[in-house]
Image (cartoon, grey):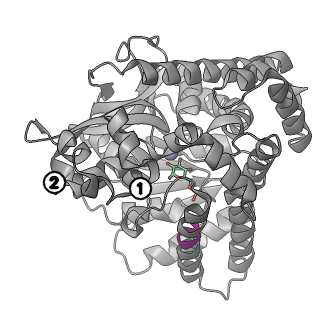
C-alpha cells in the first residue's frame, strides 16, 4: 500500500508517520512517498522520519521527491496537506485583514478567503494530475480551508476526494468525556461546513445525553467550549458549536484581541519553524529531538496565546496530540480493509442538508467502507445555522469562481458577501491589500 504525502516537508508529517508506525495490521501502508516543492524541507522531515523508524521492524519505507507526477504515480492514497505561500502567506492573510479591522485568521473570514484564493488553483492542478496518473487513488484532503479545497478538488475527482479535520472529533471527544461516556461509544450528531458546525446531540446507547450537559452549569463550565462560549449562550443555542464559531458569535472581541496581540499565530509559527528547519539542516543535531521540542513549544504557545487573545480556546493538553493523523489513518483503514466505520468528514452533500445543492461539500458523519464515505441523514439545522451555512457556502462559490476566472470583481464579491466583512469598500481594500501582499496572486489584478 503506497501513501503519497503532498506537503511532505511539512512540520506535522512526523505525526502521520508516527501513526503509521503503530499500525501493524494487514493492508497497512508499506511505502510513504513525500512530495514537497522545497527540497530542504523534504530533507529535514525525511531525517525526522528516519529517526522515528530507527529500531522499528517493518517500518514503512520512505522516499522523497520534488517531482509531483512521480510522487502520484501508483499511489493508493494521496494525503494532501500543503500550505500555498507558506507560513509567511498565513501571516499576511492575518495581518491585512486585521489592519482593515476585520478578522485575520487562517481559515475563517477574510483571511480564509485570501488563503482559499491562493490555494484553489494549486489544489485543482493536483486533482487533475491525480485523475490522470492515479485514477484509482483516494485523496484525503487536509489542506485548508479544507471544505472549500475539498469541493474544488471534487469537481475533478468526484467522491474520491474526502476532506478531514480534527476539530469535530476533538469536540465530540470532549463532550463525551464531561458526560462520563466513552468517546468511542458515543454517536455525535454534528453537521455544518468545515470549521462551521454544531453538535446537536450526543447519543450513548440510543439516549441523547446533550440535554443533561446543557442543563448543568458546572458540567458546561468544565470544558473548553463551555468556557469559550459561556453557559448562557450554549443554552440559548441548544447546541455546542465548533470552536471556530467563536469568531462569529464573539467577532468583535476576537478581532480586538488579535489586533492587540504582539504577533499573529502565523507570524509566530513562521519564525518558530524557520528556526526548526535551519537547526535541522545541521546533520549533527538529532532531528527527532529538535522536532519534539519545537512541537512542545508550538503547543504551549498555542494555549498561552489563545488564553490571552480569546482565540480558538484553551485546548486541553491531551487534545493537542493533533488527532488529524488518527482521523486520516482511520479513514484509510476503513477504505483499504473495507472495515465499516463512522467518521465526521467533508464530503459532497447529496441532499443531506436540503438548502444546499448536491455538489456542496459539507462536514457530516459518514459511513465509510471500501466504497468510500457516505453521509448519513441528519436532522435539519435551525434557521440561524442554515443562514450562516448558506452565506458561507455562497462565499466559497465566489472564491471558486474567482480562482477560475481571475476576476477581481468576483474576488471583491467573495469578500463582500462574507458575514464577517462589514462593507463592500472594506472588501475592495482587502483585495488591494492581498494583491500587494501576495505578488503571485496575479489573478486578483
Ligand atoms: C486545528 C484545525 C486546523 C488548523 C489548526 C491550526 O487543528 O482543525 O484546520 O489548521 O488547528 O493550528 P496551528 O497550530 O497551525 O495554529
Ligand atoms: Mn481543521
Is 300 in the magenta? yes
Mark 2 element type: loop
Question: How far across and how far down the image is residue 169, in percent?
Answer: 35, 47
Q: Which range of residues does the magenta coloring cover?
A: 298-302
- Which mark, residue 227? 1
The residue singled out by tag 2 in the image is 181
Question: How far across and how far down the image is residue 183, in percent?
Answer: 22, 52
Could you tell me which residue is drawn at 73 percent across and 39 percent down?
Answer: 102
Mark 1 element type: helix
Nearer the observer, 396 or 221: 221
Q: Does 188 appear above or below 46? A: above
Question: How far across and how far down the image is residue 207, in percent?
Answer: 10, 37
Instruction: State the CA–CA distance, disc 1 to disc 2.
Output: 20 Å
Q: Does 444 appear above or below 288? A: above
Some atom of ligand 1 lies within 8 Å of the CB belonging to the residue at label 1: no
Q: Does 146 appear above or below 213? A: above
Neighbours of disc 1 within 10 Å: few (<14), some (14-19), many (20+): some
Q: Is residue 25 left or right of residue 36?
A: left
Is 135 in the magenta? no
The answer to whether any part of residue 343 appears in the image is yes
Amino acid at each position: 500500500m503506497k501513501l503519497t504525502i503532498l506537503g511532505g516537508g511539512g512540520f506535522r508529517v512526523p505525526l502521520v508517520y508516527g501513526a503509521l508506525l503503530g499500525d501493524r495490521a494487514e493492508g497497512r501502508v508499506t511505502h510513504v512517498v513525500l512530495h514537497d516543492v522545497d527540497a530542504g524541507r523534504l530533507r529535514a522531515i525525511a531525517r525526522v522520519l528516519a529517526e522515528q523508524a530507527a529500531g522499528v521492524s517493518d517500518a514503512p519505507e520512505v522516499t522523497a521527491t520534488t517531482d509531483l507526477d512521480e510522487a502520484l504515480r501508483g499511489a493508493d492514497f494521496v494525503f494532501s496537506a500543503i500550505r500555498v505561500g507558506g507560513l509567511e502567506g498565513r501571516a499576511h492573510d492575518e495581518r491585512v485583514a486585521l489592519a482593515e479591522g476585520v478578522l485575520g485568521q487562517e481559515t475563517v473570514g477574510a483571511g480564509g478567503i485570501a488563503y482559499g484564493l491562493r490555494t484553489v488553483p494549486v489544489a485543482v492542478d493536483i486533482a487533475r494530475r491525480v485523475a490522470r496518473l492515479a485514477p484509482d487513488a483516494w485523496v484525503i484532503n487536509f489542506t485548508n480551508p479544507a471544505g472549500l479545497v475539498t469541493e474544488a478538488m471534487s469537481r475533478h475527482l468526484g467522491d474520491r476526494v474526502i476532506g478531514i479535520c480534527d476539530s469535530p472529533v476533538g469536540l465530540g471527544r470532549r463532550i463525551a468525556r464531561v458526560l462520563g461516556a466513552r468517546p468511542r461509544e458515543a454517536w455525535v450528531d454534528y453537521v455544518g461546513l468545515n470549521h462551521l458546525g454544531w453538535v446537536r446531540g450526543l447519543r450513548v446507547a440510543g439516549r441523547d445525553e446533550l440535554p443533561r450537559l446543557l442543563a448543568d452549569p458546572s458540567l458546561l463550565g468544565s470544558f473548553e467550549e463551555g468556557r469559550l462560549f459561556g453557559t448562557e449562550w450554549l443554552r440559548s443555542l441548544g447546541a455546542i458549536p465548533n470552536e471556530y464559531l467563536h469568531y462569529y458569535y464573539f467577532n468583535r472581541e476576537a478581532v480586538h484581541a488579535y489586533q492587540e496581540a504582539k504577533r499573529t499565530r502565523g507570524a509566530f509559527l513562521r519564525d518558530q519553524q524557520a528556526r526548526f528547519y535551519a537547526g535541522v539542516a545541521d546533520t549533527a543535531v538529532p532531528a527527532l529531538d529538535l522536532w519534539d521540542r519545537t512541537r512542545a513549544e508550538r503547543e504551549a504557545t498555542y494555549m498561552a496565546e489563545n488564553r490571552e487573545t480569546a482565540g480558538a480556546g484553551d485546548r486541553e493538553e491531551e487534545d493537542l496530540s493533533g488527532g488529524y493523523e488518527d482521523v486520516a489513518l482511520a479513514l484509510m483503514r476503513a477504505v483499504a480493509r473495507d472495515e465499516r466505520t463512522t467518521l465526521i468528514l467533508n464530503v459532497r452533500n447529496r441532499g443531506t442538508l436540503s438548502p444546499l445543492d448536491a455538489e456542496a461539500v459539507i462536514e457530516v458523519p459518514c459511513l465509510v467502507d471500501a466504497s468510500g464515505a457516505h453521509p448519513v441523514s441528519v436532522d435539519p439545522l435551525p434557521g440561524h445555522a442554515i443562514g450562516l451555512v448558506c452565506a458561507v457556502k455562497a462565499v466559497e462559490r465566489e472564491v471558486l469562481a474567482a480562482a477560475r476566472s481571475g476576476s477581481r470583481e468576483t474576488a471583491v464579491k467573495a469578500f463582500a458577501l462574507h458575514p464577517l466583512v462589514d462593507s463592500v469598500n472594506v472588501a475592495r481594500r482587502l483585495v488591494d491589500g492581498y494583491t500587494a501582499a501576495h505578488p503571485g496572486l496575479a489573478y486578483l489584478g
